Each structure stands twice: as structure tokens, then as C-alpha cells.
Amino acid sequence: MFKKSNLIILVVLVLLGWVLYSKFQPKQNDREYLLSLPSHVASLAEKKQAAEIRRFISEDYQDSELRGVREISALATAHLLFPGELAIYTANAEVELDMSAKPPQAVLTFDAALARGQRESSAFNFLPAQASVYKFKLQLEKSHDGWVVMAAEWSRKFEWACQISPI
């Protein structure tokens, strides 16, 4: 039989566990926000809104190639200033959150297919005829302004060129 003191200890331990779990469990809205970030930024890039994209890059940005915020912003702007339209298709977004870190941190990985030209929208042309597919890995930190990219890595997975003709 349980003694009254054992029952009280058990209740306190359960409550303490619940408090710790809810404090350190990532908030669902942070997870959902980060998973939607690749498609949102892709939409901004398609509209060539470099200044809006720049807001997602931390002033303390530094990647493994030793590029800082100026260099990475210039690289992104150069791609957006290239003549013609840009279509970006994102997929396979995954996020790992560490809400116990001070400040909270996340690693966001996703694939992106970058194609020059208009976004295809017909049933027969749902993919571009040519594209380069990249794997991105972003390290983010939550600041008072929201989530910002602290570092990024990317590599080309493959390129494709195909002709799809309706039957």
C-alpha cells in the first residue's frame, strides 16, 4: 500500500515532469513556422524581393566558407538580379528544434529546385524543363525579431533537363 507521503511525492514528480516537458517541448507554432519558411522565402525570391529576404539573415551570420552577412546578402541579391524570371520549388523540409538552448536554436533542412523561367502550372508541365536541385541546411536562432539564419550550407544534388510532351 502507498503511504500518503509516497502519493504526495508521486504527484509532485508527475507535476514536475509535466512542467519540464511543457517548458522544453518546442512550441508547435515555431515548428510550423520553420517548416513553412523555405516556401515563403522561395516566393519572395520569385518576386525578387531581396530586402525582405535579407531580414531573415542574422547580422552575426557566418558560414563554413567564412562568408558574413554582407557576402551572403550580395550573393543572394546577385542571383535575384539575373535577368528573367526565377521559379523555385521546395520540398522535404525537416526541422530539429532546441528550445532549451539560450537563445532557442533550430536546424532546418530542405531541397530546392531552382529554374530560370516562369513557374509551370499546367497539368502536363508541373515541373520545369530544366532545374538545378540543391540540398540546404540552415542553422537558425530565435531572436527578439523572430527566427534568423546564423549559418547555411548547400550543395547541388543534381540537375535535370527533360522534355515532357502531352499524349
Image: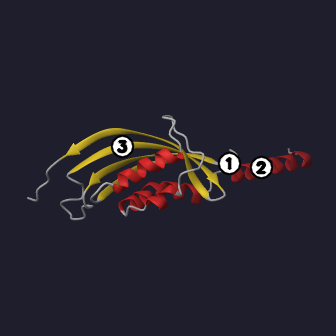
Q: Is residue 166 visible?
A: yes
Question: Residue most toward the left?
Answer: 167
The Cα–Cα distance between marks 1 and 3, rounded to whole angstroms, is: 29 Å
Q: Is residue 97 visible?
A: no
Question: What residue does disc 3 label?
Answer: 134
The Cα–Cα distance between marks 2 and 3, rounded to whole angstroms, is: 45 Å
Which residue is depicted at the point 28% across and 57% down? Answer: 83
Which residue is depicted at the point 44% across and 54% down? Answer: 38
Position of the N terminus, as image quadrant, is top right
Q: Position of residue 105 (x, y in %)?
A: 61, 46
Height in image: 74 above or below 123?
above
Residue 48: quadrant of the picture: bottom left
Label 1 vs label 2, nearer the camera: 1
Q: Earlier in the sequence, mark 1 or mark 2?
A: 2
Question: What residue does disc 2 label?
Answer: 14
Which residue is depicted at the point 32% across and 44% down? Answer: 133
Question: What residue does disc 1 label?
Answer: 103
* Label 3: element kind: strand
Height in image: 75 above or below 146?
above
Q: Position of residue 153 (x, y in %)?
A: 46, 39
Q: Earlier in the sequence, mark 1 or mark 3?
A: 1
* Label 2: element kind: helix
Position of the C terminus, as image quadrant, is bottom left
